[in-house]
Amino acid sequence: MHSAFSQNPLVKIWDNRFGGDEKEWISFLQQTTDSGFIIGGESLSGISGDKTQSLWGNTDYWIVKTDSLGNMLWDKDFGGTDKDGLYSIQQTDDGGFILGGYSYSGISGNKTQATWGLSDYWIIKTDSIGNMLWDKDLGGLSDDFLSTIQKTNDGGFILGGTSASGISGDKTEASQGSWDYWIVKTDSLGNKLWDKDFGGTDEDYLNSIQQTTDGGYILGGLSTSGIGGDKTQGSWGGWDYWIVKTDSLGNKEWDKDFGGGDFDRFVSILQTADGGFILGGISESGIGGDKTQPSWGDYDYWIVKTDSLGNKQWDKDLGGANPEDEFGTIVETMNGGYLISGNSYSQISGNKTESNLGNEQLWVIELDASGNVLWDKTIFTPGHDENGFAIQAMEGCYTMVNSSNGGIAGYKSQDSWSNSYDFWLVKFCPTTEAAFTSPSSVCPGSCIDFMNLSFGATSYQWNFPGAVPDTSTAANPQNICYADTGNYDVQLIVVGSSGSDTLLLSNYITVFPFPSPQGIMQSGDTLFANQGAGSYQWYFNGNVIPGATEYFYVATSSGNYNLIVTDQNGCEVEAVINDVIAGTQYTVDSKQLTIYPNPVTESLSVIRYSRHGGQALTGTAKEISIFNVMGEKINVAVDLELMTVDCRLLSKGIYYLEIISGEKIYRTKFIKQ
């Protein structure tokens, strides 16, 4: 199936606020497999507002699970008696969740393990309704702050963050500078498998990690280090982006530094569909170093695209006249572009097409695959909003979250609890957007059903050049049939109250070539088709013959036979042979027939009696014949008296030996080496 979308401005669908009577600081958003959402961060609130569980210490982890409409299903608080901050959440394959952050707490509250030093990595595994299954504390004797946790292909987890610890506790490698990247690999139960430290001689802070398609890892963060330690390139300015590629065991393969002449703060990295990487953060730099575009204001979003070896392909500066001082995340969109999120103080200026309602607002941009701006959206509230994140949801809409202290105004329909910061979740969809899904590759003569996914549409005009029918005004056209091989366009025009939208996809439908013609050849009672197809299924008098899935079939009954052959594209062709007369009994790979040696190089001998105690071959052999896999009879020297076959002239491959003895015909298979 293939989903296709065009692009138009956004309209709000719903919003919901989640908080207590103190501050809630958002750090993560993910859509879950049930089409709902999981959000989480730090909370200072006790039981109040939307928060149903008490606070354990200074700050706790707090997660909220919603349905697809943003309604809260449940919430959970996790913490010890000190300060604990959640930074990352991933839904796991069992429907539960893995939570990662930092903890200053000892054994207390939900925390079952003491810290090694000041702060440690703290991970929690829950079931699908947020009940804690286990937790793990990982750290050294100084400060260790986890910023990201990701599932790995082996069912375990990769943890990434920043460490000031030397060799101590769970940390097996010394620090290169004052702060280093520290990654930890665990199994599915959180037990440490290995850890690695990466750094230069100064400060290096890891913010993002992802497992790559080769099983290794890409690490991204910011660095003030010059050449030294693990860092092979000098810094351009105060802070630079620094990415490190490792193999599956965490051994470094290469590293790259990107920056301008001032401060560049890396936040997020993602491996792209082409095997390269897209990096996002904020930059204060003008043109210089790796930065090819000037800053619009104080801080801007700065996006860098690289190839699979970390070589820069392009970079983009995105901002307005005032600071964009917080970057949320970067994700790939359904059309192969990128969705950028963060926060902005800017009014209309630069790339920003809407002015803020409040002081600082969530700002979202969609780029195409080359980094060109498709649209931008300012998410209005009357407040001061922090920590903005956005994702494209399964159906193509956009869901965003931030921490907001705004009241009712703009897009915000609920007041904040006690004028403090709450989690605020909001969903937008494009207005009157043409979108659909359908199979995009079919066999000749096949018919396709199209499922409309358009937003805000009230009428539809479909055009299917080369198909029958070639137009439709139905919302979900069915039985659009393509007779001939080739590539075909599909066009959808939708009209709604907010306007119209046209989506034209060139060569969207691929009709595979016609499968090779098939015929059935009969040799004795054996029916042969052409070899080399994807699959075969034989039928007798219109009924499927269970297990008859080879290119040949021994007809044990007289009647009509047909064969459905499927080629490598999944396209079917049928062959029919009628009025087959089955007059003799064949035994394929008969236990009554023993031949040796098998495989054979020179002479093949036939034993008249089964070595398993079966009955003798009936009568004297009248004929011994050899057939190749196409059913063609091969002329070889045969001694009926000695029951031997001279195989020296046969080419290497599979053959069938056939013996006519009495009223029966016996057949078995052998291999010529």
Image: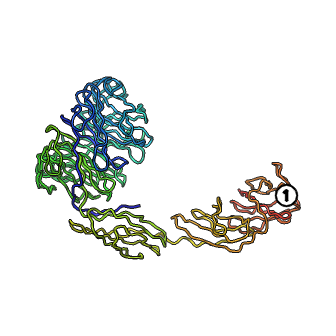
Which residue is pictured at 46% across the width and 73% down the height?
A: 485
**Tag 1's secondary structure?**
loop
Is residue 22 or residue 295 the one in the foreground? 22
Task: Look at the image and tell me in which quarter the N terminus lies.
Answer: bottom left
Residue 664 against residue 197 in the figure, above or below: below
> From this viewpoint, is residue 404 visible?
yes
Which residue is pictured at 21% across the width and 60% down the height?
A: 9
Please give the residue where the numbered disc 1 appears in the rendered image.
617
Is residue 586 or residue 296 the one in the foreground? 586
Task: Look at the image and tell me in which quarter the C terminus lies.
Answer: bottom right
Q: Position of residue 275 (x, y in %)?
A: 37, 52
Residue 298 against residue 43 in the figure, above or below: below
Quadrant assignment, res 148: top left
> From this viewpoint, is residue 116 visible?
no
Q: How many marks?
A: 1
Q: Position of residue 255 (x, y in %)?
A: 32, 43
Q: Position of residue 296 (x, y in %)?
A: 13, 52
**Badge 1 local density, few (<14 within 10 Å), some, or many (20+)?**
many
Quadrant assignment, res 249: top left
Task: Please name the colour scheme applied to the rendered image.
Answer: rainbow
Q: Position of residue 415 (x, y in %)?
A: 16, 44
Which residue is pictured at 23% across the width and 60% down the height?
A: 374
Is residue 215 or residue 431 the one in the foreground? 431
Type of amino acid under label 1: Leu
